[in-house]
């Protein structure tokens, strides 16, 4: 395979020369390249702006008030649930022992 590599490259170069020899083909290639470049750039810009909800996971923004409110309410809800469960169990156990 190593012996055929220079021959393959020479064949590709000759084919490219034959194709790009005509002005019409060069213009088509330039238009195709510019279209591809524009599509890649728009895709890259879309990827920059489409952050998922998981982007802030573990690193919340202190200025994000709705997120902070949600987190604080969630923490209070779980604590309240835990307290109710523990208090009910202790009330039941103290009533049963009396």
Image (cartoon, rainbow, N blue to C red):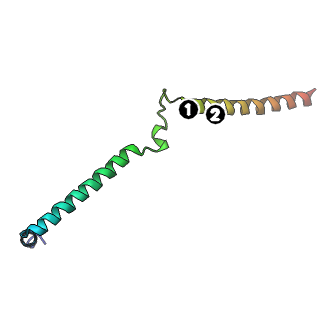
| Residue 79, position as x, y percentages in the image | 69, 30
Q: Residue at x 16, y 64 (%)?
A: 29
Residue underneath mark 1: 66
| Residue at 54% in and 29% down | 65
The quadrant of the picture occupied by the N terminus is bottom left
**Quick check: 36 left or right of 66?**
left
Q: Residue at x 60, y 33 (%)?
A: 70
What SS does tag 1 mark?
Answer: helix
**Nearest to N terminus: mark 1 or mark 2:** 1
Q: CA distance from mark 1 to mark 2?
A: 12 Å
Q: At x 28% / y 50%, what residue is drawn?
A: 41
Residue 76's spot in the image, x, y percent?
66, 29
Q: Quadrant of residue 38?
A: bottom left
* Secondary structure under the numbered disc 2 in the rendered image: helix
Q: Quadrant of the C terminus?
A: top right
Q: Nearer the viewer, residue 88 or 80?
A: 80
- Callout 2 crowding tier (Cα within 10 Å): few <14, some 14–19, many ≥20: few
Disc 2 designates what residue? 74
- In the image: residue 11, left or right of residue 73: left
Q: Nearer the viewer, residue 71 or 84?
A: 71
């Amino acid at each position: 395979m190593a012996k055929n590599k220079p021959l393959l490259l020479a064949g590709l170069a000759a084919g490219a020369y034959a194709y790009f020899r005509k002005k019409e083909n060069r213009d088509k290639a330039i238009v195709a390249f510019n279209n591809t470049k524009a599509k890649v750039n728009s895709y890259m810009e879309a990827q920059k702006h489409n952050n998922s909800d998981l982007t802030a996971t573990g690193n919340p923004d202190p200025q994000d008030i709705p997120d902070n409110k949600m987190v604080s309410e969630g923490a209070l809800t779980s604590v309240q649930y835990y307290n109710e469960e523990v208090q009910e169990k202790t009330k039941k156990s103290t009533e049963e022992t009396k």
